[in-house]
Amino acid sequence: MFLQSHRLLRASIRAAAVVASPPSTTRCIKSRLPLSLPRPHPHPHHPSPSSSQSLFPNLQARALSFPPTSANKISSSSRTQQIARHLSSSSSPSSPSSSSHNNPPPNANMASQYTTRKVAAANTLEHRIYIEKDGVPVSPFHDIPLYANEQQTILNMVVEIPRWTNAKMEISKSDLLNPIKQDIKKGKLRFVRNCFPHKGYLWNYGAFPQTWEDPNIIHPETKAKGDNDPLDVCEIGELVGYPGQVKQVKVLGVMALLDEEETDWKVIVIDVNDPLAPKLNDVEDVERHLPGLLRATNEWFRIYKIPDGKPENQFAFTGECKNKKYATDIVRECAEAWEKLITGKTIPGEISTTNLTVKQSPSRVTQDQLPPLPQNENLPAAPIDPSIDKWFFISGAAA
């Protein structure tokens, strides 16, 4: 570990010579120096995808093909040094990561209760990821508790999309038990495009169980209705997750994306087992310890649909990331909306509310009433179109 940290620090020193354009620039980047970023520690049972780092606002797309394992680019020497220091300290014997095992957070073993059942190969229309608790299939939408401790300070998050991957995976609202599957548009699997310098998603992306953004309610501040989905979550820790993983996280802040005239909240969280978790308690801590991440998050959500011919997304609050208190209030509002949905007070429409644990729900069933699920299959992922690995250079973005 010491040798790895030493190499990372040497890479950061070499990167210090790279001078970046300011974030408000609207010009295209004409020269770049390749630099391999320090990679976060992968989950021990799931390989880490290729890394990339976020940075500049740009808009209007032209594409460049690059191999998935190509060297990554960085445009902030100070950010590189910050990451190197962070990873170096996390590998130290006296780092918070080593002490966290001695003092696990409440219900830290909750994630171990959940396993995944994979049906068909990834990157196919038939692929499904079911979640089981102690071997019994459950709904990640309805059966996994929102809160992981009695104080309601630690929450459960279901990972849908690991960091630096492109497949648009999501909890299925209509399928029985709401498995995770890849989103489909016009009969084709959806992938997000790589908008330079971003590679796939910047965070472990997923949802809070037992939450729902009610499309019948217009939020008084965003002036837009809910998007009819579970509450979206961006987990910013260093461990790369996997689809179907249940993480314990704490809330730090929230952004309000306005996506096609709907309010689409993006809650910023940190895995409680992350070495930085003790230092991150509110949104200002994110900027202090991970400078540039919130700016890059704003940029990513603004531009990620442009390569598909859609306009730039907008934000409420001029793109500001609201603090922990505001975010916590949003989580509670969406939890209350879900409670009305699952108890039948709100008409579910096409949403499957079948569950095994919610006592007040008219849709509650027993395990014996469920049809048998397909057997678990650990199949290799199907190949994807090479165009998914193209980089799109976006110019003309507003600062």
Image (tube, grey):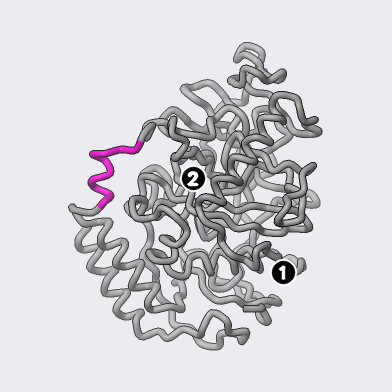
Q: Earlier in the sequence, mark 1 or mark 2?
A: 2
Dividing the picture into quadrants, the one containing residue 78 is bottom left
The residue drawn where x is 79% and y is 34% is 350
Kind of residue at badge 2: Tyr
Q: Which residue is mark 1?
A: 312
244 w.r.t. 363: above or below:
below
* Residue with the most extreme top position: 368
The tag on residue 28 is none
Closer to us: 5 or 26? 26
Q: Which of the pair 100/130 is nearer the observer?
A: 100
Q: Which residues are magenta?
A: 96-105
Amino acid type for the residue under numbered disc 1: Glu
Q: Is residue 162 visible?
A: no
Split into 4 quadrants, where in the image is the N terminus?
Answer: bottom left
Q: Which residue is mark 2?
A: 242
Residue 25 visible in the picture: yes
User: What residue is rendered at 62% in x and 26% in y?
Assistant: 374
Q: CA distance from mark 1 to mark 2?
A: 29 Å
User: Is 273 drawn above or below residue 70 in the view shown?
Assistant: above
Quarter of the image where one finds residue 318 = bottom right
x%, y% of residue 251? 48, 48
**Circle 1 SS class:** loop
Residue 62: x and y, percent?
68, 77
The image quadrant where one finds the C terminus is: bottom right
Crowding around mark 1 (Cα neighbors within 10 Å: few <14, some 14 to 19, many 20+) is some
